[in-house]
Amino acid sequence: MRLVLRQLRLDRRLSLEDVRQEMDWSLSKVTRIENGSVSISVNDLRALLDFYQVRNADQVRDLLDLARLARRRHWAAEYRDFVSPSYMDFLGYEDDSWRISQYHPFLVPGLLQTERYARLVVTTGPQYRVDNRAADARAQLRMARQRRVFAQSRRCEVRIVLDERALKSVENTDLMLEQIEQVLSRLPELDLVVLRRDTAANSVLVGPFSLHEFESEVDPDVVYLDNLPDDVALVEDHAVVAGYKSSFEDLYRQAAAGDDARRLLETIGASLREQAPA
């Protein structure tokens, strides 16, 4: 598929930028479709083949069949009806990253959430408060993401700046104790630091984001911004991505790391236990 699409573009003497402008896609998306990093939807492929002026009915049918098959094979295909296309693209970037760096000023990032916490976050959106099936699916998708990212066979570095405020933002003590235990259990698998409340004065101005870095030079690094409760927005402008990289490093340097981070988590957990009803 990818080689055919690249050849069709070259036959038309079109650049990647030409395709980006015509299709109103990101340049990263065009590049990743051609290098096989992500699959292409049937509707997107129809539009692309029309742009390339492919008129052979058999060739169009065969390529569309390949696109359908590739989409079915995606590990998150069963959740496709419950998330936006941009979120599915986000999962593709997450799959291919060699390093993922996440920060959220008020919530525990998705890669660390328990299923109960994830469901609470998901149901803050009015469209899911009465749709239990969709809320369950989105919470389960977060659990599936975690299993995939932290799989033993996966070679991916995960860095998370966990804001202390995120561990005190939910009134349900039992839920938050469970969440802290989940974070502690993940420490061997990731590089986690905890941003103390007293050093995080301006961190809320940064906002929640996930930085994805890639080994391939043809895949530029990107940032995804959290759009609560249920979507993400891609940022690929090189200068803006560089700014988010700098912001993450600033937050990372300010935060408690290693044994200090563990002790801070354990202290917060102990404080919550004291508040819990007998």
Image (cartoon, rainbow, N blue to C red):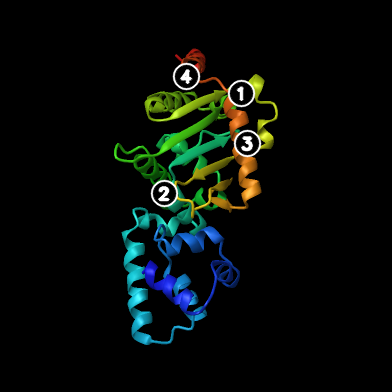
Q: Earlier in the sequence, mark 3 or mark 2?
A: 2
In the rendered structure, which amino acid carries the disc numbered 2?
A: Asp
Could you say which disc has been placed on residue 246 in the image?
3
Q: Earlier in the sequence, mark 3 or mark 1?
A: 3
Q: Is residue 146 left or right of residue 235?
A: left
Q: Nearer the viewer, mark 3 or mark 1?
A: 3
Q: Nearer the viewer, residue 62 or 231?
A: 62
Residue 223 is situated, as x and y percent measured from the top left of the image, at 56, 47
Determine which residue is flagged by label 2. 96
CB under 8 Å between callouts 1 and 4? no
| Residue count near mark 2 (Cα–Cα under 10 Å), binned few <14, some 14–19, many ≥20 | some
In this rendering, the answer to whether 242 lies above or below 192 is below
CA–CA distance between discs 3 and 1?
13 Å
In the rendered structure, which amino acid carries the disc numbered 3?
A: Ser
In this rendering, the answer to whether 96 lies above or below 34 is above
Residue 194 is situated, as x and y percent measured from the top left of the image, at 54, 24
Q: Earlier in the sequence, mark 2 or mark 1?
A: 2
Determine which residue is flagged by label 1. 254
